[in-house]
Image (cartoon, coloured by chain):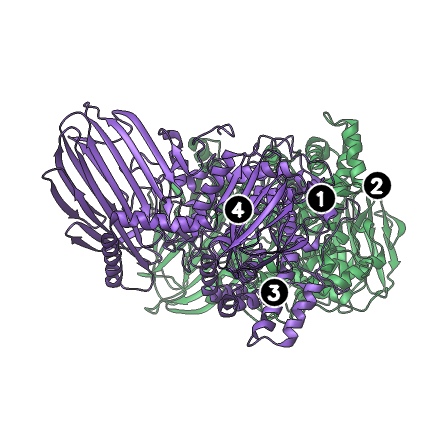
Chain colours: A purple, B green
Amino acid sequence: MRMVGEPIFPVEPWCVREPSLDLDRLGAAESVFAVSNGHLGLRGNLDEGEPHAIPGTYLNGFFEERPLPYPEGGYGYPEQGQTVVDVTNGKLIRLLVDDEPFDVRYGQLLDHERVLDLRQGVLRRTADWVSPAGRRVRVRSTRLVSFTQRAVAAIEYEVEAVDADLRITLQSALVANEDQPQVADDPRVSAALTRPLVAVDQDTEQHGAVLLHRARASGVLLAAGMDHEVDAPGDYDEETDVREDWARTTVVCVLAAGEKLRLVKYLGYGWSSTRTPQALRDQAAAALNGARYTGWDGLLQHQREFLDEFWDAADVEIDGDPVLQQAVRFSLFHVIQAGARAERRAIPAKGLTGPGYDGHAFWDSEGFVLPLLAYTMPHAVADALHWRRSILDKARHRAATLGMKGAAFPWRTIRGEECSAYWPAGTAALHLNAVIARAVEQYRLITGDLTLERDCGLEILVETARLWASYGHHDHDGSWHIDGVTGPDEYSAVADDNVFTNLMAARNLRAAADACERHGAAGVSREEIEAWRAAADAVHIPYDERLGVHPQSEGFTGYAPWDFHASRDQQPLMLHAPYFQLYRHQVVKQADLVLAMHWCPEAFTPEQMARNVDYYERITVRDSSLSACTQAVMCAEVGHVDLAHAYANEAALVDLHDTHGNTGHGLHLASLAGAWSAIVEGFGGLRLKDGRLCLAPRLPRALDRVGFRVRYQGVRLCVEVDHAEIRISVRDGADAKLTLLVDGEQVEVTPEQPVTRPVTRREPLLPAPSQPPGHAPGQGS
Amino acid sequence: MRMVGEPIFPVEPWCVREPSLDLDRLGAAESVFAVSNGHLGLRGNLDEGEPHAIPGTYLNGFFEERPLPYPEGGYGYPEQGQTVVDVTNGKLIRLLVDDEPFDVRYGQLLDHERVLDLRQGVLRRTADWVSPAGRRVRVRSTRLVSFTQRAVAAIEYEVEAVDADLRITLQSALVANEDQPQVADDPRVSAALTRPLVAVDQDTEQHGAVLLHRARASGVLLAAGMDHEVDAPGDYDEETDVREDWARTTVVCVLAAGEKLRLVKYLGYGWSSTRTPQALRDQAAAALNGARYTGWDGLLQHQREFLDEFWDAADVEIDGDPVLQQAVRFSLFHVIQAGARAERRAIPAKGLTGPGYDGHAFWDSEGFVLPLLAYTMPHAVADALHWRRSILDKARHRAATLGMKGAAFPWRTIRGEECSAYWPAGTAALHLNAVIARAVEQYRLITGDLTLERDCGLEILVETARLWASYGHHDHDGSWHIDGVTGPDEYSAVADDNVFTNLMAARNLRAAADACERHGAAGVSREEIEAWRAAADAVHIPYDERLGVHPQSEGFTGYAPWDFHASRDQQPLMLHAPYFQLYRHQVVKQADLVLAMHWCPEAFTPEQMARNVDYYERITVRDSSLSACTQAVMCAEVGHVDLAHAYANEAALVDLHDTHGNTGHGLHLASLAGAWSAIVEGFGGLRLKDGRLCLAPRLPRALDRVGFRVRYQGVRLCVEVDHAEIRISVRDGADAKLTLLVDGEQVEVTPEQPVTRPVTRREPLLPAPSQPPGHAPGQGS
């Protein structure tokens, strides 16, 4: 593995630049340079397709089924898995210089640069290449997936003859069933699928083609179309060939030295499991018509306008740490790419940037990604929750299979069915249901919009509350327990009274009860609501009096210590030690009790928080990317602000520095979103407590200033923090008025009257803790 | 499922008779009528091969490898499974009457009877059949697998023309790669393997043939040979054909009415993963030579002598319950068939009677089968423990993989590698290591032989002790804990401080320490031995003060109750409810805490035993066949003797009544052995306490008398119990003297001086408990 911190991309505030091509790191770059709008995603493969690590074109919700074979099965095990499919590739533009294909592995690559522009929302590439026969060309391409036309991608491709007359051939293609690389023998890497697309129909258009395919087992239909505009200095030939699995538009011309051939390629996609091939063909054609009507310059301009609007209310500024500045903008950009147009489909853990985790969505989405979106692009949260509502019947069915009432959402899925094949770390992680309920609650509190709760959220709240009510039980003392579940930490499983789960379940029950009372819930009796409140009020929270800390789950603090020295080089641990050992030792993969303190702060005193952070810091190895961000927030909370800064960097750099070594399979969206959380909730101290917005600023020594913008109940809020003071202002109409708490003091902010308050440095209760050997932030795998 | 108690086989004391053929119950009959010596086993398939449920010829240790595919893998998961193979079938003797094949499905079957003779050790069959064309024959066959010539089976086959001249053709065959039936979609049923045998060579002999095959993936070699003697009233033709996958000796003659054709078929097998095909060919030929030299009558006679000797020191007599009488003899017979000649190979859970559980050996063998053998055929125990020693290196390797010291024996295996593909109910059941250690200890105590411990057992004791020492840990108070293991009950998993496991581990540690001190163990330091004793002395045994019972594992008695009424018809539960639910509720598949009281009685007061039995009776569903026997013993112990009687019947009848519905996949050997335990340890109260033999007789009301014989430290002990008194006598030389405890009173028994003591009826501390609805003994699935 690379040395951590070794720079790959130069530090720049508004872009990610790759100054030269590194064939050993192609995969990570393909993920980092992915362009997507949440509906359609293109990995950052080279225009000419090869070399590649993993070719990838993904459509949100387009999947193939595959069997899940168990050597020893069990009741309720899902038998069908779902896997994201690399669909018909429209990114391909092959270039031949005289007779030689442009391939960076041959000839001489004088210069190669790629830039992901976070404000323009495009991927730009330039190459200066001399063919093996000595012919020199300059290639310049720009690629985008439109935020404003969700089914459209477009590429501008320009080739220039540098110093001699050249015959230039461009082959712009659609290719289905691309060969996939053999994936590694790692449980985290998705299963490879061979030739999953069955040809249904093909159309040749005047300047392009449309290919229709069907996924072999899932039956989902797909239409992929391309259209072209050619700009050549003189005559050129253009023709289009179509076969079942490919279509090719060829443009041939001769360029004199200094002349350029320019091709604009529009791509349109449509897919559905219910509509007919004819309807999908029309849908793809309509996308192409729309793109062509808007034109390349129009698409570029709309892209910029969309992002200007986004950054205006979402940007985070960091003075004093340009690395983190770049990383957090990169993070925000990719979260928006994943969520902007997901539109009632899931937001997968990797977005549409790679095949990792089979393209599944997990609790990450509601837990880490939606909070960011709720403060920056709330309609995307509404869409995501509508997706959850749309799979509620499947979740009800799953709950029934599991012998529970209400709804049990799948641990991992594309279409809604449970696809987790190892139940102790999947189905048993029931907490995800409470995390979804929390997302419903947060959306209401952050936007002030009650309609989503009424139309969609209430049903989710009620059904998840029913799940908890049927799953938990009161003991002989009346205490309410939840036994046999897995919390966020995947190095423990099937434990009793997991604090995170219990607190979140109680919160879920109360939120459902409140929502029922707010809206009047048909079919929910007064007794049911009272039972929910009674369970929530009686929830058992284990506490270790001897150590003065909360055990993550009942008995956890009595487990044997893990030998961190012996396992120092075993990263991640799960590839070196059996679950059998991990589960029974005090070793934590990812924040669990610490996450409980972040999300349910009302259940902990400041002293408990300090002691708990101290305890869990020493045993948490962060083999999950879902940990550093939470540790950042809670370290900031208890006063270890510089440590928080280190964690914020770790969360933000997970992909830019490929710190887990698997960025090539797709980006770690939740960690990227968590980087925002580390800054805004960590350094800014942003929280919702008792439904009120709170700030509690605390800046690491290395930072001079942090500024962030969020949307809150219809107003745009700007916060700037430095070591002396916090400045808060709002926009959006003269009557915008915001009441919030700053370090516990209630303040009112209006557009005319920004608020400034002094920042007081708080001393931590305990000295900064250490981490397991080899696992200080920035050191981890 | 059949009504429980519906008779299949008439009740007779010394045989199992099937008065007529029931094609719907072929599978169970094939298992019940299996003949085996532990080395070689033949299912009770009809001579003519068809119809069958599962054809089966098994060689102990002959297996095929198969991949274990995990939808979500994990570190340390075994990747290769091992599966018993139906090898070259030599049982086949096809009969043609004129041109018509004898097939019970066609023509008219006037009479058909099969008898398993428990004293002769043979399976006899008679059939009276009229062919579709109206030709009548009587067929009589006798089949044995020799106890005295381990590689030999033999069949005497006689056909009589009843009322007309008939042309009779006998085709005696060897057939490799028989078609296997599609097995059910049930995790307990073994995976089917298609054509696993690859032909290596074939020999035609004067009256038979030898076929050599190799298992495709495992590479184990196999030679199967047949030889024949023909006895015809006049001329006959005989010829032998051989192909790669079959050999056929054909005998043709014409019989006048009343005449008989008799064929004796000898079978010889050899197999090895190290020897050459040439050596195996010679080995099979030698077996055939030996069989022919001994002759059919000789084989029969030796079989009888072997069993006479066995029954003389092992018979159990039951006056008052002829059903149980038959069943316990059937049980003893099959246990001997499984163990007599296993000879340093494993004793699989199903013996060599069917493909269930893939032919794997589990802890059942040491836990339930070896105790019976230790008291009746001790050399078989020595052999079984030598097998464990022979796989110790594999167990060391497994322990290292799991991050432990010492040796971790496989939960299920044929050759020694772990083949369990669901670790929470496999590898996590570490207790099996202590059960093996217990078998070592019991062998020493029961036989008085120290040499096995010295030569073989010591190494097992030391390595298992090291496992526990590395796995357990002392807490801050010094208590020693074992977290994250699965006890015997498979409806709980990965729990902390399982009482059974903790007690057995402590016993393992002490046994190892004692053995080291007895023999002087090279490589074991004084400090290591002291650490073992310290851990054993500090072992934590959870106890629920409020309820006055032992929780099976820490926290168990606080779990939610299971809704037994709702699940009344869901038998077995594991096919109707997910592990996720079972594990977190108070529902017990099989005796766990109750087994701890049986095997570690010194850790419980009589009052605790009574309360614990009362508590666990109400929540135990016995979805495992490894439960009724233990419940029998412990119910008897606490005075519920009539309940114990019902459990003894349930254990003994598991296969004769096919109470679990899967006898067709092989017999439940541990339950059969447990039936002996229910009677001898339950009604006789036989125990080893502090190394001393104890009796504590208590007879159910329905029984008039129970007699049993065991071998103990070289003498044969006879015990007879009725409601008035217990009579104890010994044999084997005038100087045989036995000291034992009867109801706590020390008595001495010599051949001249039998001992009689009165039996006093003890009142139970608590009323007889109830079981979950639908699960009273005799009611269960």
Both marks 3 and 1 on one chain: yes
Residue type marked 1: Ala
The secondary structure type at the circle numbered 3 is helix
Classify residue B520 as left or right of residue B95.
Answer: right
Secondary structure of the residue carrying tag 4 is strand
Do tags 4 and 1 sit on the same chain?
yes
Spatial CA distance of label 4 from label 1 is 26 Å
Residue at mark 2 to residue at mark 3: CA–CA distance: 83 Å
Circle nearer the N terminus (4, 3): 3
Q: Which chain does the numbered disc 4 sit on?
A: A
Which residue is the site of mark 3?
A: A511
Residues at marks 4 and 2, CA–CA distance in whole angstroms: 97 Å
Q: Which residue is at 76% across, 58% downward?
A: B634
Q: Amino acid at mark 2?
A: Asp
Q: Which residue is mark 1?
A: A610
- Type of the residue with mark 4: Phe
Regarding mark 1 in the picture, which secondary structure is present there? helix
Q: Callout 3, which amino acid?
A: Ala
How far from the left and from the top, in percent, is residue A292? 23, 52
Name the side, left or right, on which A680 lies relative to B637.
left
Q: Which mark is residue A243?
A: none
The quarter of the image holding the C terminus of chain A is: top right
Q: Residues within 10 Å of mark 2 (few under 14, many from 20)?
A: few
B677 versus A174 height, above or below = below
Q: Comparing marks 2 and 3, which lies closer to the viewer?
A: 3
C-alpha distance separating marks 4 and 3: 29 Å
Identify the subunit bearing mark 3.
A
Residue A708's disc number = 4
